[in-house]
Image (cartoon, rainbow, N blue to C red):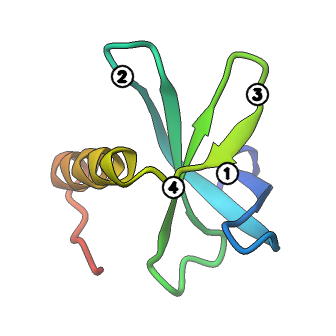
Amino acid sequence: MDETTRMTVIDEMGEEREVRLLFTFETPDKRQFALFTSADDQDGDVYPYQYDEDGNMEFVTDEKDREMCEEMLGTFEDNEGFENEG
C-alpha cells in the first residue's frame, strides 16, 4: 500500500485511528470531503470527513452529508470495480 495514503484521524468517538484514504471529492458548493477506511481494511467501515483549505478535518455527522458520502462511495465502488460490503 502506498504510505502517502495512510494517516491518523480522530474518529467520532474521539479515538485515534490509522486510516487509508479512499478518495476525496468536492461538492458544487465547494465543500470538500474525504472518505477513509481502516488502514488494515479488515472491517470494511468507511469514515467520512469534511475538510477545509487549511487541512482541518471534521467527522461528518450531518445525516444529509453522510447520505451524500454514501452515494459517492457507491459511485466510486461502481467505477473502480469494488463490491460494497456494508
Question: As shown in the figure, which amino acid type bears the numbered disc 4?
Answer: Thr
- Mark 1–mark 4 contact, CB under 8 Å? no
Residue bearing mark 4 = 61
Element at badge 4? loop
N-terminal label among 3 and 4: 3
Q: Position of residue 17 (x, y in %)?
A: 76, 70
Which numbered tag is attached to residue 2? Answer: 1
Residues at marks 2 and 4, CA–CA distance in whole angstroms: 17 Å
Crowding near the residue tagged with mark 4, few <14, some 14–19, many ≥20 C-alpha atoms within 10 Å: few
Residue 84 image offset from top left, x and y in percent: 24, 72
Mark with earlier residue (3, 1): 1
Type of amino acid under label 2 = Thr
Q: Residue under circle 3?
A: 55
Location of residue 42 with respect to 62 vertically, above or below? below
Q: Residues within 10 Å of mark 1 (few under 14, many from 20)?
A: few
Q: Quadrant of residue 53?
A: top right
Closer to viewer: mark 2 or mark 4: 4
The CA span between labels 3 and 1 is: 20 Å
- Residue 26 x, y percent position in the rendering: 42, 23
